[in-house]
Image (cartoon, rainbow, N blue to C red):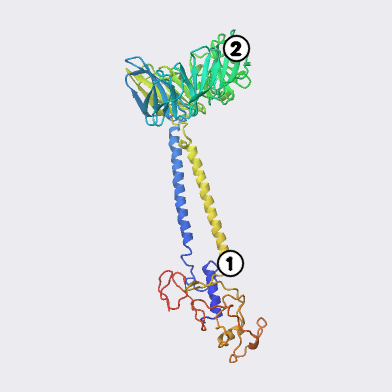
Amino acid sequence: MKGSPDSRHRVHDLDLRAYGADDVGGDRRAHRPDRRRTAPRTVIRHVARRIAAAFVALMMAAVALIVAPTAAWAAGAPPVPQQRGNVNLKNYEDVAVNGISDDGSVAVIYASNVASGSSTYFMVTLNDVSITELAGAGVISTDGKQVYFVDTDSGKLKAADVASKQITTLNGSVGGSEYVVGATADRVLISDYSGSGVTLNTYDVKQQRVTATTKISSSSAMLGVAPDYSHVFAVEPSSSGSSATLQAYDLTTGQSSPAQQITGPSGIDYSNLSVLSTLVDGKALLVSSYSSSASAALYYRLDVTNGRLTYLSDHPYTLTTNRSYTEARYVLGFDGPAGDPANGVNLSKVSDASSMSVYDIAAGRAAWTTSIPAGIDAKFESGNYLGLTNDGKHMLVASQTGTSGGSLISMDTKTGATSEVRIPDEISGGYGGAAMLSGDGATVVVATTKGDDSQLLIFSTGVGGSPWTKVETWLMVAAGSLAVIVLIVVAIILLRKHGARKAVAGAPIAPRTSAGYAQPQSAQPAPSAQSYAAASAPAQAVSVPAQSAPRHAASAAPTPASPSAPTVPATPAVPTVAPASVAPAPTSAVAPAPDQSASDQSAPAVRFCTECGTRVTRPTAKFCPGCGHPLGS
């Protein structure tokens, strides 16, 4: 019946089904949810498919990164170094590499002019393979952004910017007899050997002046500098060579600490004690001394905190001679048979050693030991350069084979496996070094000579370098991405389940009128027989027009019975009330809806689109407002 309480009650039932309540029967097609309400779910599924596809692509890329290096390492050998550039130096000879930055972006080389015999220093930026001439011996700052040198003509301190290639003259006088020892991003350490002893000047780059001067009186002292150039340690032997002292100097203030006696194993000849490295790990220096009784060089760890000198092993060993002593924590060594380490090791060839070890100077012991690989003699005994990566796991050897060229060899120090690339020209043996490995181990440069011309070859080693070039880094990125995707999907599922439970448990949605959604109605009791009878009778004349249902009152007022209505027995739940006892409802309690007149009205007929399930409240509507489908009569 149009406008009856029963029809209004059924409308609310349909609302519940449309928002996910269980369908208890009837035409499911007619009660199908509005497709517009399911759009968020469709979007979520679409986005989830996109995320899944992106993750699959990421995993395929990770697998490709794994497989590519696996092929190169299939036989257990390290990657073969790959040449990626070269610098031609026509009419120059005796080319040598004096330094390279930790990240392999810039190098400083020395060369001799064939015609004049004069020496020249060059800054070589390895990424764009460009060359800049320097008027003095250049030193690369620890951050790799500047190359500092003292101009041999003017005596001025100058800085060459690696990025712009511009050379700037810095303020302050340092003197023509001085040269740069080392530099950080904010300070330059300059040495002067013009007088007795050694003078070290600390130059502040921001202030552009010398802020501290440190004087070491003995010219026989062996110096070891901290990597940040904050301190210098002087090892000074006695005139008899039976003892030595260690003294620390603060390069910020120029002040020194009291000298302390160096203690070590018996039989050490301190007169020829040499410092081979900068301060390693803030605690130790690598030092050596020649033993006439063993006819071999002996190597020690010197603890700068207490002056104690100790061997690196409990059996004889020798260390390879390579430039990486300067700043390296790890050094390659060869071990002799069991015995006293003071006996040293004399090798006519490398394969005579019992084993090969990588020694950790900071820890004062061998980090790992492996057997001597077969055929290693030819690779090592003619080597012009040996250099370890920062972690000690790989070593690069520039090896000369007569005058017919040479090779660059990469070795895995844990397994002894090697890979090799041929170099057609003669490897230069100029002052400073024929090759040098960057601090991160990713780049090595090799100087070669052919007639009156020379070249600087640039190789990528395939090891070390930035973390973003490593497979492990990308695997961690893939794992992190997967974790984020899983968290997002779980969060979406939980939110949707929570929303569905709230929709079912909440109040029913009010019917929609032509002016929008009506205010939610309060809960109504189930209709009784008396209420049906009252609804069918003519309305009693009162001050407020009769309404089909009160919209804002807390509860519905009972309808007075009409005299013409048939007699209906009262039910216990709803007692019969005499018409005279019903007071007229206040005019403010029930207000007509905006689209209703003040005359008697009943609720509009409600229809549902058979195509999409949209509720249609306009009786005259011929097409569905949701999908446009024609509506039945």
Residue ID for mark 1: 506
Callout 2, which amino acid? Ile
Is any atom of residue 330 visible in this view?
A: yes
Callout 1, which amino acid? Gly
Residue 125: x and y in percent read: 39, 28
Quadrant placement of the C terminus: bottom left
Task: Using the rendered view, name the quadrant where residue 21 is placed.
Answer: bottom right
Question: What residue lies at 57% left-to-right and 63% top-to-bottom?
Answer: 501
Q: Does label 1 or label 2 sit earlier along the sequence? A: 2
Residue 492: x and y in percent read: 53, 55
Left or right relative to 603: residue 267 = right
Q: Secondary structure at mark 1?
A: loop
**320 or 170: nearer the viewer:** 170
Is any atom of residue 354 visible in this view?
A: no
Reply above or below: 521 against 238. Answer: below
Reply above or below: 212 against 63. Answer: above
Give the distance between the C-alpha atoms of the residues marked 1 and 2, in whole angstroms. Answer: 91 Å
- The residue at the far right in this view is 572
Residue ID for mark 2: 268
